[in-house]
Amino acid sequence: MSPSSPSRILIIGSLNTDLTTLTPRLPRAGETLTATSFRTGCGGKGANQAVACARASRRRPPPPADPRNVSNSSSHDSDDVNVQVSMVGAVGSDTYGTQLLNELSGNGIDVSGISVHENVPTGVAVIIVESSTGENRILVIPGANALVTFDNLVPPLPELVVLQLEIPLQIVLAVMRAARQQGVDVLLNPAPAVELPVEALQGLGHLVMNESEASILSGGVPDSEEADSDMALQSALRKFSDLAVQQTIITLGAEGVAYSTGQGSFARLAAEEVDKVIDTTAAGDTFVGTYAVEVVKWKREQGEGTFDLRKAVGKANRAAARTVQRKGAMESIPWVDEV
């Protein structure tokens, strides 16, 4: 790769408009409860992860009206990483779809691979956030996300493809097969989790998931008070190592992160301390995007050397900690100089 050419990350996934309600608690069955606030915003796991990749590779742009900060926007800043982020997905020809395309473009993301469909609504996510804990519950209406298509990876090939499971599973599996055939590294975030064919995971480069997703994929990870059990986590992670997954990461919320390599090593990293958890909605997507940039940064700088998994997990952990201290999904994702 030429030093002047960008590293390429391709995200293939969902684009949604988030309809978020903040409430002191969840209403009981049959109960009407007055909520604290309501807002709309851009989201979807694919779009969030694309924005997280873009922001993890560059500094926050200065306000256009402030000429004193013009120099900060230079792509040669020490914090910036030469990364081109592209996205493949689908939206409807409605206001929500236009807003998503504008938001992604505004973050420097190539949206030429996003198709726009007439008479089909853009995907929507209904999000309820409890103000006391910052925990969320999400209902997704796929809309145009169900129409995502894939033919093949075309040159210039990306250094990394990032996938989730909010688009049709057959598309995800087709992308994984094509990437394997063409020697392209893949990061899979299996959310929302479903059982996957064993062959889909065999030899996978990067598997990043939370404890409930790991439980579904492995049948062996606790998603309750036992989540901090090293023995239980090692048992689950070993199942993925046995499938030759090269890097496996399980995010555990307030309990931190557990991870292992294909060689079977196991480690834990504590959660970053935060003043107050406001909203956890995009924390996982921030983690994935930041980690993805660390992967391609390593590929550019060290080639075939040993990947410093702990360093990458630590950077992603810090970025996610910034996200949970802010409201919203996409708007809460930090830039590289904020981590």
Image: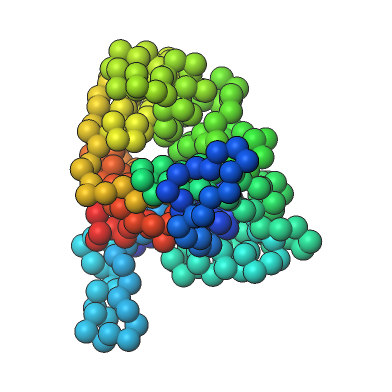
- The foreground one among 186 and 22 is 22
Q: Quadrant of residue 231?
A: top left
- The foreground one among 313 and 138 is 138
- The foreground one among 77 and 67 is 67
Question: Residue 206: where, in percent of width, then height?
Answer: 42, 33
The colour scheme used to paint the residues is rainbow
**Residue most extreme to the front:** 31
Q: Residue at x 43, y 33 (%)?
A: 209
Give the quarter of the figure containing the C terminus. bottom left
Question: Residue 2: where, in percent of width, then height?
Answer: 35, 57
Is residue 319 visible in the rendered structure shown here? no
**335 to the left or right of 109:** left
Q: Residue at x 34, y 18 (%)?
A: 226
Q: Quadrant of residue 270?
A: top left
Above or below, 334 relative to 172: below
Above or below, 338 relative to 95: above
Above or below, 166 relative to 17: above
Above or below, 170 relative to 128: above
**Residue most extreme to the right:** 119
- The foreground one among 337 and 294 is 337
Figure label count: 0
**153 to the left or right of 229:** right
